[in-house]
Amino acid sequence: MTAPIRVATADDWAQIWPFFQSTVAAGGTYAYPDDLTSAEAAALWLETPPGITIVYDDGVVLGSAKMGPNRPARGSHIGTASFMVAPEARGRGVGRALAEWMIDWHRREGYRGIQFNAVVETNTHALQLWRDLGFRSVGVVPGAFRSATHGYVGLHVMFLDLTEAGDPAEGDHGGG
Amino acid sequence: MTAPIRVATADDWAQIWPFFQSTVAAGGTYAYPDDLTSAEAAALWLETPPGITIVYDDGVVLGSAKMGPNRPARGSHIGTASFMVAPEARGRGVGRALAEWMIDWHRREGYRGIQFNAVVETNTHALQLWRDLGFRSVGVVPGAFRSATHGYVGLHVMFLDLTEAGDPAEGDHGGG
């Protein structure tokens, strides 16, 4: 079955905002300002080209991801992405489906790799998912995140190589 | 001798812009867009609180640095900084003086550490300076920078711990 994932529109924001807000308020995963208005958060989350934002829409929007170049100009060949899943939908593969779509998007767009700048070390579910999908930890910045529940914890920088040399999936599916 | 460093004002931009522009155009150190107007570059370089921008002003402005929180909210206890030195003033300690001022500023402001997100691995002069000042490399994101002269090269994430436990300078000068 293909996951019900599509590009987000401005109309989706009303369904994203509640889980964006509760995710940031929980204080365990993101360093977004905690006093964002809905409009400010929408401006941060809904990407403009060359980035895009997607939703997992199973009748209701259960999750969303945004992606695009991690840096401009001389760094724009490396992408990055962020994810949010509605609390009631966790553990059902929504994050994994969004992440797989995100990796395919980067391949199609010709990115050479994907960098996550700040994966909280106590977010073990996310770390395991990224590792399952081929990301490796480049390093941990110690104490760089003030977790609501764990205090100062490290932030992993993670990387997935999408060049032919570094990408095992290229070999698996290599054309003939 | 105290280095002639002071907080920058908008009037300093006319002297910063030429070396900002030539540094970005050289393509060896920064992933800023290469088509920035002077006004766009000024908006990026001249920080607003809680960040600040400083200049090394020896009669003429020979260098500049900007600094502030690396992330908002739950990441705002870790600072970051960027540096530019006029080509004609390189090798005269301007960058080191700006960096020492920058580290002192972070201590005074109560930051727990300083993170550099993207130090180009072929910028060996900068890497050596940061190491001299106590930074360590957390890791290298391979091929994340497209250098004008070296092609795809890695970007170091570097970190200086300013907490009591991690900061050797605290021991050296410990009050009594």
Image: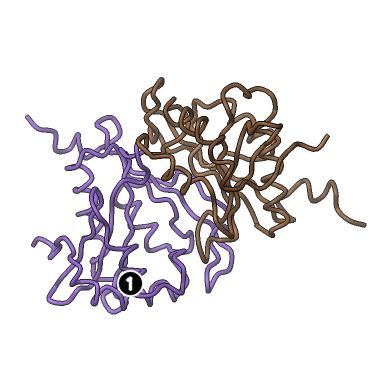
Chain colours: A brown, B purple
Question: Quarter-wise, where is residue A82 in the image?
Answer: top right
Q: Position of residue B159 (x, y in %)?
A: 37, 44
Quadrant where the image shows the C terminus of chain B: top left
Q: Position of residue A174 (x, y in %)?
A: 86, 53
Residue at the image point whose x is 49% and y is 25% from the top: A122
Q: Position of residue A13 (x, y in %)?
A: 54, 41
Q: Position of residue A106 (x, y in %)?
A: 67, 52
Residue at the image point whose x is 33% and y is 41% from the top: B78
Residue at the image point whose x is 41% and y is 45% from the top: A40
Q: Chain of mark 1?
A: B
Please determine whether, in this image, residue B73 is positioned above or below residue A10: above
The residue where tag 1 is placed is: B39
Helix, strand or loop status at disc 1: helix
Judged from this view, the residue extending furthest toward the right is A176
Is B140 placed left or right of A102 in the picture?
left
Question: Quarter-wise, where is residue B170 in the image?
Answer: top left
Residue at the image point whose x is 47% and y is 52% from the top: B156
Is B150 placed left or right of A93 in the picture?
left
The amino acid marked with disc number 1 is Ala
